[in-house]
Amino acid sequence: MKNILKNFLIFFLILAVISTIIGFFSSQNTNIEEVSLAKLVQQVKDDQVKSILVNGNQLNITLKDDTQQTSKKELSESLTEALKNYEVPTDKIAAIDIKVGEEPDSGMFFTTILPFIIPGLFIIALIWFMLRQVQGVNNRAMTFGQSGAKLADDKRKRVSFKDVAGAHEAKEDLMEIVEFLKHPQKFIAMGAKIPKGVLLLGAPGTGKTLLARAVSGEAKVPFFHISGSEFVEMFVGVGASRVRDLFKKAKKASPCLIFIDEIDAVGRQRGAGLGGSHDEREQTLNQILVEMDGFDNQTNIIVIAATNRPDVLDPALLRPGRFDRQVVIDLPDIKDREAILKIHAQGKPLDKDTDINMVAQRTPGFSGADLANVLNEAAILAAKENKKTINQLTILDSIERVLLGRERKSHILSAEEKKITAYHEAGHALISHMLKNADPVHKVSIISRGRAAGYTINLPKEDKKLQSYSGFIDTMAVLLGGYAAEKTYFGEVTTGASNDLKRVTDLARRMVTEFGMDEKLGPRTFGQKEEMVFLGREIHERRDYSEKTAEVIDQEISAYVNEGLKTAIQLVKEHKDKMEKIVDALIKRETIEKQEFESLMA
């Protein structure tokens, strides 16, 4: 559409310029008076004419007072004969300077011929333009079923495993794929079948795409990359056609690597009953399965797919012969986070006192993309403050900005609200300090960030892969610390505890229904969550238990929540002196860091 508008604009500009030129010449000619031949004869008889320039039948007259006039005569006779026919004396004719010019001048061309030529040329150009547009549509229609996969084969921008920090086990698994691509004959000689597909599983931002590019860079082979959503169109059969075209291109560039990002867009389980038997997504998935079955040992092509939803994939995709390998990419631990931060810190002027290890300790549960975002936010903050380097405080501030949002300086609390918020956050911090299975307090603040009026940051001493029953019990008490403090000191609660109540209820429900930690209900799970995607995303639970069991589940959830609240209220009442210390420090300074908090608790 932009090209069409651009071409039409060019045509109209050209037409306007030509019209201006024609108007200029026309205006020059219209200023000269045109007289009849009879009047010219009378002027000659009256000795008013100085000279006459004859151009065909056009007469350009100059009077003795230098006035310009024009007139016309018949082409069949000369001017002298015409004047004699009007009985003009010969001596009068001889007194006039008569000159004969050439046929016809450029002014006649611009004023007479060009106005007829320009519209014709414009119509011809418009017809040519329309034919060209139709031809372009036909070309796009012919290429509609071709794959939109992009080929990344730039040797200067190749990524290797050195550029990927952490994910050591994943890199070891993928090194075998590099060997298959580099030396396939070594494995074929042993009778081994080269894996046709590798499925990368991991949370968003863990580096699945980066690892796929690193495999291509290590093997030094072409890299075709495409998203799963680029196969699917509203027309049935287009996705399957694009899959065929993609594998056709890949076979020509063999050995190579095909990377399909977000494969769950087309790889969801078939037979969901949505879209009928001619569902375009299912047809595309069927073609992917057929193409992967069509590989032989001599076709040195490996398909790498990535998803963060392995639970919704069709079982046919995961069977041997298709995606033979499944590589799980976990969130980075503290050592990996430190290595990732060092990579993303390259090119950023960090202060000499910046402690990357401390930043890694402050970011448990962050993915590689989150860590990159932290340093990017720190660079933006430093630039806004006109600093020359990025210091430790700026990075710590960017962590809180990524976690909670930016400071809401315009959100000023009243004295009463500030006091309630201080007691609320003090309750969280006090109980975190008193319970041995709770995570230590790193920061307490009553400065608004995002939607929170205040916040307490608890960070584990070391990364945890497993959570225990006692840890969950203490966590529920910590979550209810703010609620308990408000109820104990003010006799009522505010809306500030709504998110805490939601989190503690969800945790208690998972302990009962998912983790089998309830003694009364025993070691089993309750309910199966199913996802339906139709006119939006909807997750519902299919019950595999009776109404009586559902009542017991509700009772046990309430029992866990009430037990956590009881523990929180007890600790808040027993340590009123420490609570008051925390509250006084928060009201005065608004923020308490880890060292100051521990000195208050000593």
Image (tube, rainbow, N blue to C red):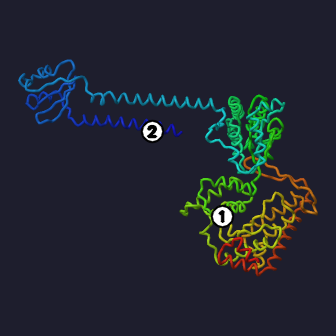
- Position of residue 600 relative to residue 344, above or below, is below
Between discs 2 and 1, the one toward the N terminus: 2
- Residue drawn at (77%, 51%), measured in percent from left and top? 330
Q: Which residue is mark 1?
A: 396
Tell me the kind of residue under disc 2: Leu
Residue 155's mark?
none
Q: Residue furthest bottom?
A: 577
> Which quarter of the figure has residue 291?
top right
Tell me the kind of residue under disc 1: Leu
Q: Disc 2 or disc 1, which is closer to the eye?
A: 1
Q: Residue furthest front?
A: 352
Q: Position of residue 151 (x, y in %)?
A: 64, 36
Q: Position of residue 35 (x, y in %)?
A: 18, 31
Q: Quadrant of the C terminus?
A: bottom right
Q: Position of residue 5 (x, y in %)?
A: 49, 39
SS at mark 2 in the image = helix
- Residue drawn at (15%, 32%), measured in percent from left and top? 62
Question: Is the residue marked by circle 1 packed among few (<14), some (14-19), or many (20+) residues within 10 Å?
Answer: some
**Can the viewer see residue 389 in this picture?**
yes
> Which quarter of the figure has residue 154?
top right
Q: Quadrant of the N terminus?
A: top right
Q: Residue furthest top?
A: 76
Which of 272/365 is in front? 365
- Position of residue 226 relative to residue 126, above or below, is below
Which of 573/116 is in front? 573
SS at mark 1 in the image = helix
- Residue drawn at (44%, 29%), measured in percent from left and top? 123
Calculate the distance from the C-alpha at mark 2 to the C-alpha at mark 1. 53 Å
**Can the viewer see residue 532 in this picture?**
no
Q: Which residue is mark 2?
A: 9
- The answer to whether residue 429 is left or right of residue 85 is right
Question: Is the residue marked by circle 2 packed among few (<14), some (14-19), or many (20+) residues within 10 Å?
Answer: few
